């Protein structure tokens, strides 16, 4: 659905201002490539926080604490 909305927005931009639409088409892959390192940093920090969470809760889990099961609706 998001792809369809983006395509329609680009088509409207193409009709209204075609040089800007073509510039966006050319620069989008460059912006995507530049954002890859930031995504990798985000994944790394997410994994680090999950590891710290598991490490801090390890004593409680060893003593028998279990997280609540998700309520089935």
Image: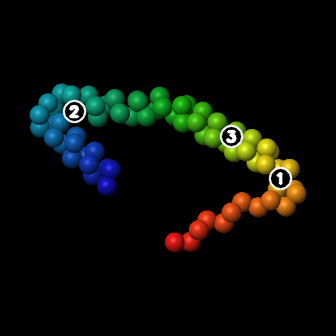
User: In the shown orientation, is residue 41 left or right of residue 2?
Assistant: right
Q: Residues within 10 Å of mark 3 (few under 14, many from 20)?
A: few
Q: Depth-wise, is mark 2 or mark 1 nearer the camera?
A: 1
Give residue 11's quadrant in the image: top left
Residue 14, relative to residue 65: is it above or below? above
Q: Residues within 10 Å of mark 2 (few under 14, many from 20)?
A: some
C-alpha gap between disc 3 and disc 1? 18 Å
Residue 2, image x, y percentages: 32, 50
C-alpha gap between disc 2 and disc 1? 56 Å
Residue farthest bottom in this picture: 73
Give residue 6's quadrant in the image: top left
Question: Reading the chain from its start, which is encountered first: label 2 or label 3?
Answer: 2
Q: Which residue is mark 3?
A: 49
Residue farthest left in this picture: 16
Residue 20, relative to residue 47: is it above or below? above
Q: Which residue is mark 1?
A: 60
User: In the shown orientation, is residue 38 left or right of residue 30?
Assistant: right
Q: Which image quarter holds the N terminus?
A: bottom left
Q: Residues within 10 Å of mark 1 (few under 14, many from 20)?
A: few
């Amino acid at each position: 659905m998001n792809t369809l909305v983006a395509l329609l927005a680009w088509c409207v931009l193409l009709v209204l201002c075609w040089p800007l639409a073509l510039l966006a088409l050319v620069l989008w892959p460059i912006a995507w490539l530049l954002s890859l390192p930031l995504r990798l940093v985000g994944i790394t920090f997410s994994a680090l926080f999950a590891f710290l969470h598991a490490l801090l809760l390890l004593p409680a889990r060893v003593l028998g604490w279990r997280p609540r099961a998700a309520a089935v609706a």
